[in-house]
Amino acid sequence: MTRKRRPIHWFRIILLAILVAAAIYVQRVVLPTVPPPFVATPTATRDPASYLADAERAFAGGKLQATIDAYNDAIKANPNQASVYISLARVQIYAGKYDDALANAGNAILLDANNSMAHAVRGWAQFQKGDSTSAEESLKRALELDPNNGMAHAYYAVLLGTQYVNGAGALNGIQVAIEESKAAIALAPNTIEAHRARGYILEITDNREQAVDEYKNAIALNANLPDLHIDLGRTYRAIGQTDMAIQEYTLANTLNPADPRPSLYASRALAAVGSYAQAAQWAEQAVNADPTDPYLRGNWGVMLYYSNEWTKANVEFSFAINGGTTEDGQKIEPLPLTGEDDLITEFFYTYAMSLAKTNRCDQALPLAQMIEGAVPLDETAIFVAQKATGLCQQIMLTPSPVPAATGLPGITPTATP
């Protein structure tokens, strides 16, 4: 009872409280941010919006694969955004990857079944794959969901216009196509698709000067898409401006050297004005881009034939008509003669004539007979086939040169086989 209390050491108490507070802070704040030992440090997550910005920049520069890669990265970062799948599918169609576009448009519909643009882009991909029936259903569904969807109107206009060119579709299809293209411009005046669709409808209705203006409007929105330059080049050629057409095809080829179409179209344009040597160079360039395409081989054969290089032409015609194998072992499938494609028919009858001119009548005559049986209503094909036959008959009946007199009896002229 009489023992004295020890004095309270406030300094020690304060120090102990500070140590306890520091321990709690370390446990709850510091330790969660420290990676565990022997575990890889995670990479910082990138904002999905930055991938979308990358995609837009790449598309503006015409870098389609880079655009596709950026959209795929955005989807990995946030896989639940339907609009990104739609944008990706749209670019994949420009890049010719129609199956991928169909898949991604389908993904967008799974995420948002009532998304008008998802149905529109799926319809456009189906159209590019040649399934016009499914495409029309998808586009009508898109317009049902949103009658003000300008891009859906643009896609539908092109579909109806193509049916008109092919002699299919409704009787008033072209009138509906015209109205759809006008609606596209009114509803989506700042889109490539609207101006391209309007240009196409003007082109196929013989308003090509106006079509040129619309294609130029589309190019003004993005000058780095090769398909737009192909469209404009085709229209220039139709109105007789071959130089301008070649300029556009050259731009398209520069933007995408792997695509043989600009070189093919340039060769046909130059051949139409008699510039066969240049045409043959472009045709060869097209073959280099896709060596296994028999159509490109046949086109090159035509240009070589009119450049009087008949032996070389025979090689390319043989690849196109008989098939074969390239030097590096790639297989070339032969083209059938059905009469449905005028250029393929041209390959066959020009080959017959080229064979006849190089004294290969053992091949020219059967080919000429086959042409007469396969396309009896094609006047040009029949005329050339008969001309090749007549040339071979003349060759076979022409006597060989008589040798100089040798004093030997019994030497008589013989027919040249």
Image: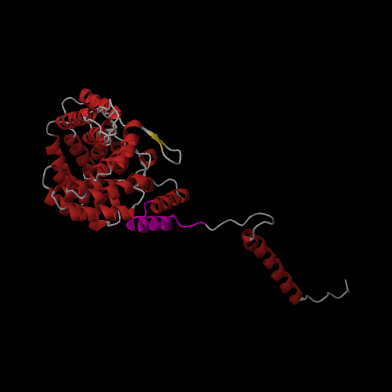
| Residue drawn at point x = 12 percent, y = 31 percent | 171
Q: Residue furthest right?
A: 2
Instruction: Report the number of discs.
Output: 0
Q: Position of residue 128 (x, y in %)?
A: 30, 39
Report which quarter residue 384 is drawn in.
top left
Magenta: main secondary structure equals: helix
Q: Looking at the image, which is closer to me, 172 or 269?
A: 269
Q: Residue furthest top?
A: 373
Q: Looking at the image, which is closer to me, 324 or 360?
A: 360
Q: Looking at the image, which is closer to me, 407 or 204?
A: 407
Relative to 188, does residue 135 appear above or below in the rendering?
above
Q: Position of residue 153 (x, y in %)?
A: 21, 43
Residue 217 as seen in the image, left or right of residue 24? left
The quadrant the N terminus occupies is bottom right
Relative to 51, does residue 374 appear above or below in the rendering?
above
Q: Looking at the image, which is closer to me, 112 or 393?
A: 393
Q: Position of residue 120 (x, y in %)?
A: 28, 41
Residue 230 can be seen, yes or no: no
| Residue drawn at point x = 45 percent, y = 38 percent | 329
Point out the stretch of residues depicted in magenta: 45-64
In the image, residue 59 lies in the stretch drawn in magenta = yes
The quadrant the C terminus occupies is top left
In the image, residue 215 lies in the stretch drawn in magenta = no
| Residue drawn at point x = 16 percent, y = 40 percent | 177
Residue 215 can be seen, yes or no: yes
